Image: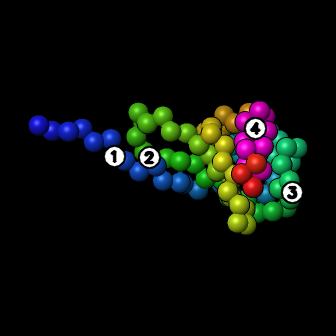
Amino acid sequence: MNLIQNNHNHGWKSVAKGTLGDGFPFHSKLATWLEEYTNIPKETELEILEVSCGEASCPTEETMIVWKNHEFRISRKKENISKMDVDLSWKRFVSKG
């Protein structure tokens, strides 16, 4: 009897680097919302990563913004992040402190 194994990797993949001042080519409002709702300095070098496993049927979608020793996660694909996602995710990030 064969057992189906759903064992695949959800590795983080770097998709962009830049600053809030430069903005992000994949999302016209993300940098503005991050400036508005977070205390990330405008000229800090950020790296944007996404979870990806390469399987089309896999629903995992998450974006992580990394700077210095911080990792800020938003549970949405980078192109689909809303203002509310930024606000709520930042509040969760700060509360974990």
Q: Distance between the residues labelled 2 and 4?
A: 26 Å
Q: Mark 2: few, some, or many residues within 10 Å (few <14, many ≥20)?
A: some
**Does the image show residue 24?**
no
Please report whichever mark, 2 or 1, sits nearer to the chain's N-terminal start. Answer: 1
On residue 42, the disc is 3
Please report whichever mark, 4 or 3, sits nearer to the chain's N-terminal start. Answer: 3
Name the residue tied to disc 2: 53
Name the residue tied to disc 1: 7
Depth order, front residue of 63/43: 63
Image quadrant in which the C terminus is located: bottom right
Nearer the observer: mark 4 or 3; the answer is 4
* Residue found at x 83% / y 49%: 38
Given contact means CB atoms under 8 Å apart, are the residues at marks 4 and 3 in contact? Answer: no
Q: How far apart are marks 4 and 1 (CA)?
A: 31 Å
* Residue found at x 61% / y 53%: 49
Magenta residues? 83-94
Image quadrant in which the N terminus is located: top left
* Residue found at x 49% / y 47%: 52
**Residue type, label 1:** Asn
Given contact means CB atoms under 8 Å apart, are the residues at marks 4 and 1 in contact? Answer: no
Q: How far apart are marks 2 and 1 (CA)?
A: 10 Å
- In the rendered structure, the answer to whether residue 44 lies left or right of residue 54 reads right
Name the residue tied to disc 4: 88
Please report whichever mark, 2 or 4, sits nearer to the chain's N-terminal start. Answer: 2
Please report whichever mark, 4 or 1, sits nearer to the chain's N-terminal start. Answer: 1
Report which quarter residue 32 is drawn in.
top right
**Residue type, label 2:** Cys
Nearer the observer: mark 2 or 1; the answer is 1
Element class at badge 2: loop
Give above or below for 1 relative to 63.
above
